[in-house]
Image (spheres, rainbow, N blue to C red):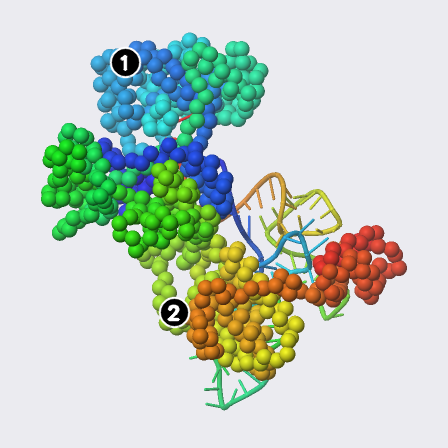
Amino acid sequence: MLADEQVEQGRCERCHSVVETRYLRQWWLKITRYAQQLLDALDTLDWSESTKIMQRNWIGRSEGATILFDLEGCRRKDVTVYTTRPDTLYGATFLVIGADHHELDDFVLDDREKRGAVNAWRNRLPPATEEPDFSVGMDLGSRAVHPLTGERLPVWVAPYVLGGYGTGAIMAVPGHDERDWAFARAHTLPIVQVISGGDLKGAAYAGEGLMMNSAGFDGLPSEDGRSRVIEKLRERRRGDASVQYKLRDWLISRQRYWGPPIPIIHCAKDGPVPVPEEDLPVLLPEVEDFRPTGTGTSPLATVDEWVNVRCPKCGEAARRETDVSDTFLDSSWYFLRYPSTDFDDVAFDPERTAGWLPVDMYIGGNEHAVRHLLYARFVMRALHDLGLVDAAEPFTRFRAHGMIILEGAKMSKSRGNVLNPDEYIERYGADTFRLFMMYLGPYTAGGDFRDAGIKGMSRLLNRVWRVAQLATSDGPHDDRKERRRHRHIKEVDDDIAQLHYNTAIASINTFAVELDQEAAAGAARSIDADTLLKLLAPFAPFISEELWERTGHDDSVHARGTWPAYDAELARPQRVTVAVTVNGKVRGQLEVDAGTASDELERQALTLPRVAALLDGNQPRKVVAVVDRIVNIVV
RNA sequence: GCGCGGAUGGCGGAAUGGUAGACGCGCGGGACUUAGGAUCCCGUGGGGCGACCCGUCCGAGUUCGAGUCUCGGUCCGCGCACCA
């Protein structure tokens, strides 16, 4: 039993068994009601742009028109279609009803034989494949009346139209829609050009152009035509502007044992009645066999003493709902529960929630870009509208971490290419392994795992070990060392904020190498060693804690509020190297005080012997001098 | 097909439009040592004796200056994929 989005190309995404369709009564959450809000609020979130784009695509808003066509010869008297291109209305040459349309019968010509033929045809339909087959379709025999021209158009049924999207029926404009074009070709239906551009002999033209063969609209740019046609339809009460979303409602029913039972009691008299709040949560009964039944009902249905209850309204005999909910529903609010796990009378405490949420920074895999992250946003909004939480959005910032690949493929147990970190942890220790993983590359990038280089991190920790134990000199104030210390704090600080853990570790390493050399000479300062341990603590928590203790500190290296601060003024370098280039090629360097004015840089640059030689007595044509950066001399 | 990323030494990767290759691995040389697959130090993009020349996927462009910006292409990865 799967949700639509758990189906990949007609198969289960996990076990790859072929999916078959069965009709069941199930529970859905009306996420579609929040489609517009969920879309709009994306602009206010500091999330990875790619994640936001995926959500936008998933919500799939489109603007167009609904158009009413009268029908003749069948039970239904009219049908509404949805189109994003009302400007091509005059090019509609037939209608197509989705093969899975719930009321397909009503569109079929009122004729016993025809109806039988359509039913037979529908029952023989091959299962949906990846590639749409435009040769599959059938004329229903009824006619549709074009709302503006009065022309009679044939009505077809075909699986390439989706019964569940929009109105489940379309007006086919083969001149300007690829799929309609392919279908018209396969069934020799007329193709009419109503927008200039392209050559309809070879393909449909879906671009913009001037309207043609469109009565009074001829000559109008198609972009403007859309609203003009809608206007005309509205005047005649034949249509209106319309917005559609691809987003579907969320099917939360699962016919399994494991999961939170959906808290509903079915009563013959009162219908579905919610379980009273004081009886929540509904707990799972203890059972012997919790395997799926394969019959389309949950194993819970077999537990009579659990299923049979009294209706909370009328007290008569009633039955519990036996479906449990999708685990995505759990992950849609776990962050609300986290701060309040010590409360057992409520799901979450309002005060705690207000203090902790929304989540400032959420890091997860991009595989959750749409499902988990959209469901969680929806649940949060719904709870917000119910007045249960203050925030409308659960995660202020979101960044997707990269995925570590092994031998070119995502690690998975089924593929057998998993890597067990224990082996490395045994050999090098957890700190080294952790450090190495963070050093591999940018956190958000991911990439192929190779263990080459892990030794470097082992060496780094060796250095830190020596430095921490040997750094004892606390001589007179050393301005250079103090500036260096502030510089490294700033670098690590900035890098962590941007999730650039790899460069943060590089900075720590550079610091450690220099301190190691000073320590060997007996000149390493303990304040530097302390700073080094603090900076290292988030990356190698165990060894830094151990060394922190060994160097005589009573508190923890991880103690709250003890992250080192830097002075921006001290962190700035006081001497800088300015490159001197002639025609863009490097010819020399200047060592100057930071902030040396550009005219002074220019003066010094021109005195460099190599520059003078290249100038050969001539005046430079132009000199660009940028403070602290570069002097470029154009000859 | 549509959308989004990416391409930099032998390798992982650095680089507010300003000295390309930080840092690490590997490699070369050296130190210490009975020994070193331990540790430390120095060197390490390619070519040339050299002054220099060439180098960030390819091709144009903008700029005093482009890995970085613009346009066009190639290849790779990811997501969506009959949504009318």
Q: Is residue B81 above or below residue A228?
A: below
Left or right? Give the position of A626 relative to A431: right
- Label 2 is found on which chain of the structure? A
Residue at disc 2, secondary structure: helix
Q: Residue furthest front?
A: A351
If you read the primary sequence from the N terminus, does the residue marked by circle 2 or circle 1 appear first?
1
Q: Amino acid at mark 1?
A: Arg
- Label 1 is found on which chain of the structure? A
> Can I make out residue A387 in this image?
yes
User: Which residue in the structure is indicated by mark 2?
Assistant: A425
Residue B81 coordinates in the image, percent (x, y): 40, 35
Residue at image location 46% in from the left, 56% down from the top: A447
**Splitting the image into 4 quarters, where does residue A527 fall?**
bottom right
User: Which residue in the structure is indicated by mark 1?
Assistant: A75
> Can I make out residue A513 in this image?
no
**Splitting the image into 4 quarters, where does residue A158 fall?**
top left
Image quarter (top left, top right, bottom left or bottom right) of the N terminus of chain A: top left
Residue B9 coordinates in the image, percent (x, y): 57, 62
Residue at image location 26% in from the left, 42% down from the top: A325
Q: Is residue A451 above or below residue A381?
A: below
> In this orientation, which residue lies closer to the viewer: A194 or A222?
A222
Residue at disc 1, secondary structure: loop
Left or right? Give the position of A14 relative to A554: left
Q: Amino acid at mark 2?
A: Ile
Left or right? Give the position of B21 relative to A368: right
Between marks 2 and 1, how big is the CA–CA gap? 72 Å
